[in-house]
Image (cartoon, rainbow, N blue to C red):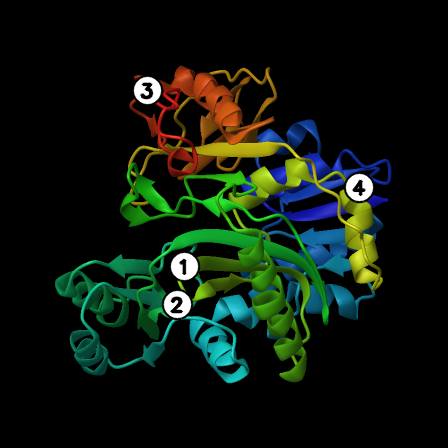
Amino acid sequence: MNILVIGRGGREHSLIRKLAESEQAETIYAAPGNAGMEAHAERVAIEETDVDTLVSFAKEKQIGLTIVGPENPLMDGVVDRFEEEGLKVFGPSKQAAVIEGSKHYAKSLMMEYGIPTADYRAFTDLAEAKNYIREQGAPIVVKADGLAAGKGVVVAETLDEALLAAEDMLEKGQFGEASREIVVEQFLQGEEFSLMAFVNGSDVYPMIPAKDHKRAYEGDQGPNTGGMGAFAPVPDLKESSYDTAVTSILKPTAEAMMQEGRSFTGILYAGLIETVEGPMVIEFNARFGDPETQVVLPLLENDLVQVFLDVLDGKDPELSWSKDTCAGVVVASDGYPGVYEKGRPLPDLDETDGAFAIHAGTEKKGARYVSSGGRVLLVGAKQKSLAQALEVVYDKLQVFEDNEDFFYRRDIGGSSIASSESHIK
């Protein structure tokens, strides 16, 4: 069948690479895609949120399956429109995608249905928010309610930092419409991990866990980003914590959404933290995580096209996973997540020794790749162990040494490897 993937980032490039392995995939289209996808997909110059044109294109090209990558088209109701036109599409409805589109909604849902998460309050009034922050003290977390491309979260270590974050969001409109309301929540202590699942109503098929590194700089310093690196599975995560996350978080959330009249079909992503009281929810997303997808999908042994079709048909896809480990490190434009320049030339990457490059923000200038985004690409590797995978990745990243146009973190996965490992420079 012909397949359409909506999106332009690393998550979509990773999806396309996996879909291209399937004998069921005839032509894969990417709308609008990026330069790195051209080896496996035909790019189509349609924006992710141009729903009418996407529907017309899907009909014209007889698309048998559409997969929606990013959150914005989901919140714009692209899945609803495709379904109205009788087109097969994988992703949640606009009503279900609100679990990501509004942090306030997600928190209220969790509180109502007893899904473990941090205590919180939501505010539209700055004075009230500041009073609450002062009452609670630091550390404390301040979040924009709406979609902010992974950047609308401030983990404030001091009172002043928290008050400034509230001011920036509510008064100065730092994230526009997304920060007209904010959520202020209790700081949770523990190790974070991500858990994604294929969901159809009350049917939940969990993937293997992954760990993402959100902060821009080494030592988990600097501002939050969309993600600077990831690995899967998570070697220091207890099996009991994984089981609890599935039975006490993912499944009850899917059932709660059904009770709310917002039945969820698609990828439910839970950003979790393992606390002394067990796993708790930091956030939900209504789609594949980025960069977690880039390290989880290479470990999936199933035909991904068949997995999507099975889940949509209400069948168990019987997921099978490699025993290997996959790790990836993001190369970002200098200045990200703030102001950065585009059009900077990229060095050639060596994809031997199990290494691969997933493009997120690239275009072609002549025969050469140039940057077109903040997160430019991810260099990943699949190996027997996390240490081996990262050794390959960091070896391939040497081509970016002394290149002032780009930066990457040199400590991805470091805390999960024995400190005696010296290959992470």
Q: How far is disc 2 from disc 4 in space, using C-alphas?
A: 37 Å
Q: Is residue 58 left or right of residue 268?
A: right
Ranked by sequence position, the earlier of labels 4 and 1 is 1
In the image, residue 333 above or below residue 245:
above
Q: Which residue is mark 4?
A: 303
The reply to whether residue 372 is visible in this rendering is no
Image-quadrant location for residue 96:
bottom right
Sequence-wise first label, 2 or 4 = 2
Say what secondary structure mark 3 lies in.
loop
Q: Which of the two labelled residues, at mark 3 and mark 2, occupies the earlier sequence position? A: 2
Q: Do the numbered discs 1 and 2 sit on residues whose CB atoms are within 8 Å?
A: yes
Give the crowd class for mark 3: few <14, some 14-19, many >=20 residues within 10 Å: few
| Residue shown at 41% from the left, 40% from the top | 228
Q: Residue beneath label 2, please? A: 178
Q: Where is mark 3, residue-wise?
A: 403
Say which quadrant the C terminus sits in.
Answer: top left
Among numbered discs 1 and 2, the one appearing first in the sequence:
1
Q: Give percent across and percent down for residue 160.
A: 13, 63
Query: Which is nearer the eye, 215 or 35?
Result: 215
Q: Quadrant of residue 172?
A: bottom left
Quote the CA–CA distance across marks 3 and 2.
35 Å
Q: Position of residue 119 (x, y in %)?
A: 36, 76
> Is there a contact, CB below 8 Å, between mark 1 and mark 3?
no
Closer mark to the observer between disc 4 and disc 1: 4
Q: Is residue 34 above or below residue 188?
A: above
Q: Horizontally, is 1 left or right of 66 in the view? A: right
Q: Which mark is residue 148?
A: 1
Q: What amino acid is labelled 3 in the image?
A: Asn
Report how far apart the C-alphas of labels 1 and 3 lie in the structure.
29 Å
- Left or right: residue 400 versus residue 109 is left
Q: Amino acid at mark 2?
A: Ala
